[in-house]
Image: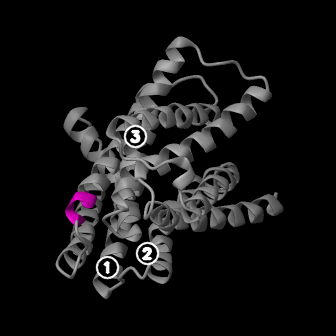
Amino acid sequence: MAANKNKAYIALLITSLVWGTTWVVSKIGVQKTPAFEVASIRQFSGGILYVCFFLFKGLPLPTKNQFKWLSIMAVLMFVSSNGLATLALRYIPSGLAALIAALYPLSVVLIEMIFYKNNKINWGTFIGLFLGIAGIALVFYDSAFHNHSEGYWFGIMLSLIAMITWAVATIFIARKKTDMNPYYATGWQMLISSFIMFLIVMISGDSIPISSIPLQTWAALAYLVSAGSIFAFIAFIYSMKNLEPGIASLYAYINPIVAILVGSVIMNEKVTLNIIIGSAITLGGVNLVNKSLKALK
């Protein structure tokens, strides 16, 4: 039992480090290749591997109703959330993109309050919301008014939409469950989303021939699929099964820190004291929101 727990902590570390670096690697991938083309290839590669694995194990094809549910989740979680977040990396630092993505629990609370009249919140939730918004505002200020790149605010908007869409998907999953194996379902969502994104790429014309995709992008894709979508995902499952939920979820707070640090080293992304303080405040606020909500269950 102790050995499993030790392995689970190692798995948590792997999950945190790898998923943190995928933000930087994604930014590398979209430097010379259209973002939606990169995202579609990534999701197709990961999706086909997952689906084939579970089909080989004997799981049946999705039913008509399951396929409808899978298609909705594919649009919310992968076409919108992953696709737009990948596109945003062309305009904003990878660390900032990861930090915005970490705000999704705050969005879940706000959506539940506004649209579902969920009043099961306390002062801890409100304080956490305030800290999360205040911290991200500090990071925005530091990046926005100190030599930010062209298209900065467009990238911020894309990241916020992607984060909100992920929050909507989280609520949708909680309210409309399916009886499918969750990892098999994820594979189908990835696969379905890849075809939708391929279609978007074809209609928009924002693509380059497969033969023209540079080695830099293929190397990034190889890492994103093998390390990000498979290796780290397996480690994540193991940590979730063998650690307390509160500890296993710590990866969500470590990812942005890893992305900021790795981005500063590899991509020369600016890291200032304001960004560090703002990030710490934001992640502290998100953690406070999560704890306050768990206390109400």
Counting labels gives: 3
SS at badge 2: helix
Magenta stretch contains residue 153: yes
The residue under label 2 is 260
Q: How far apart are marks 1 and 3 (CA)?
A: 34 Å
The residue under label 1 is 275
Whether residue 20 is situated above or below residue 234 in the rendered picture? below
What is the crowding at mark 2: few (fewer than 14 residues within 10 Å), some, or many (at least 20)?
A: many
Q: What is the chief secondary structure element of the magenta stretch?
A: helix
Picture residue at 71% right of the left edge, 60% below the top: 8
Q: Give the range drawn in magenta.
A: 151-156
What is the crowding at mark 3: few (fewer than 14 residues within 10 Å), some, or many (at least 20)?
A: some
Q: Which of 32 and 135 is in front in this view?
A: 32
Question: Residue 18, position in %: x, y?
Answer: 60, 64
Q: Which of marks 1 and 3 is nearer the N terminus?
A: 3
The residue under label 3 is 201
Quarter occupied by the C terminus = top left
Report if the CB atoms under discs 2 and 1 are less than 8 Å apart: yes
Question: Residue 76, position in %: x, y?
Answer: 39, 36
Which residue type carries mark 1? Ile
Whether residue 51 is situated above or below residue 126 in the rendered picture? above
Q: Quadrant of residue 21?
A: bottom right
